[in-house]
Image: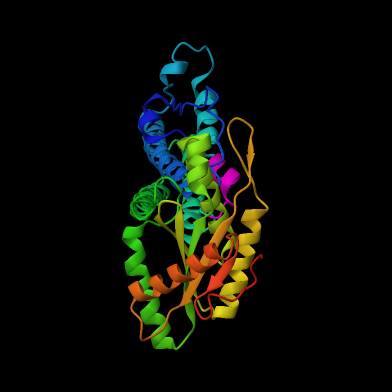
Amino acid sequence: MAAPMDEMTNRDSDFSGGRESEMPESIAVGNLVDAERDILAELETALSEHIALVLEWNRRLLVPGSDSDRDRNSDRDASVTAQNHAHSHADDHDCNFGAWYALNQHNRLIDQPAIRSLATTHEQLHAAARRLLEHFEHDGRVDAAEYDAMALRAESFFAQIRRLERAFRTARSDVDPLTGAYNRQTMMSDLEIERERAIRTKSAAAIALVDLDHFKSVNDTHGHQAGDLVLQTIAGILQSHVRPFDKVYRYGGEEFLICLPNADMRQTARILERLRRVIEASPVTLTNGISLPITTSIGAAPILQDRQIGQIIEKADRALYAAKEGGRNRVRVWRNPESTENGKK
């Protein structure tokens, strides 16, 4: 896991090529908040790292043959040292960001167009610097076109990092810090948008409420830290097992709300039953080693033109109540909440 923002000041960044840099680390898995925090920390580190690298490259051009502070007492020939520096600094996998991206590029938060574009610009920046420094070492002359290309790539790299940082910080403001699900503040506006889309396109959609069975006893028996771990685990299961365009929200306490676009009630019931079974088959291992089985009761209602979002949530809540009254650990949909809909008896 990358260092948190408030711990980054102690991170040693050596750009002289002499000391071995820290090994890159994988970003957090499971919790969206931790993963986004790790990405933000890495972006900030990449920015400061490459500002220092660009300054170092410029120093090589302006003060040819000079050594870094680490090499001032070295007996090695200055030109050989400079050549080694040029190749080392221009290697895009020699810096922390290049190695970090190579390690994490298949993570779902990293494998997206904006970050792939940043990685491409990063490679182009190092390639431009490599050409510039190699030609300078060969004939002692700075090629203006190559220098401008390197400067342009650096400017683009820095600007892309700042845009990504703004995007991730905005996303984090919409996320519940404990579970990584979207929070209730952003939920209502998202649901209104989905309702308007479903009406406009005449497509089916649904809202579901997921409640953890007997959650109070988890807190009472094992403590609130265990309860937090259960909430985080269930949120992770929900987010990783819904469809890519479904959205999971922390509705309150031990309840989650799921918005399911393009799903009629039969499809909704199948999706929710699959979620229920995955949760039932995934006991939570507490820090003391206890394996805690968790079940959920789920209620759902369709998004309809003649109902406002508050009314639809109320119908889903009534279906959830029917699921609990029916014995818990089952799915009910509003169309006929008293009937068994793929749930357990």
Look at the image and name its color scheme.
Answer: rainbow
| Front one among 148 and 186 | 186
Residue found 60% across the figure and 64% down from its top: 330
Residue found 53% across the figure and 27% down from its top: 21
Q: Quadrant of the C terminus?
A: bottom right
| Front one among 80 and 285 | 285
Rendering coords of residue 287 (x, y %): 58, 32
| Front one among 193 and 154 | 193
Q: Magenta stretch mostly in which secondary structure?
A: helix
Can see residue 192?
A: no
Rendering coords of residue 298 (x, y %): 53, 64
Residue found 43% across the figure and 40% down from its top: 46
Q: Is residue 147 above or below residue 261?
A: above
Can see residue 140?
A: yes
Q: Is residue 94 above or below residue 189?
A: above
| Front one among 212 and 6 | 212
**Membership of 54 in magenta stretch:** no
Rendering coords of residue 155 (x, y %): 35, 50
Q: Which residues are magenta?
A: 98-108
Rendering coords of residue 79 (x, y %): 51, 25
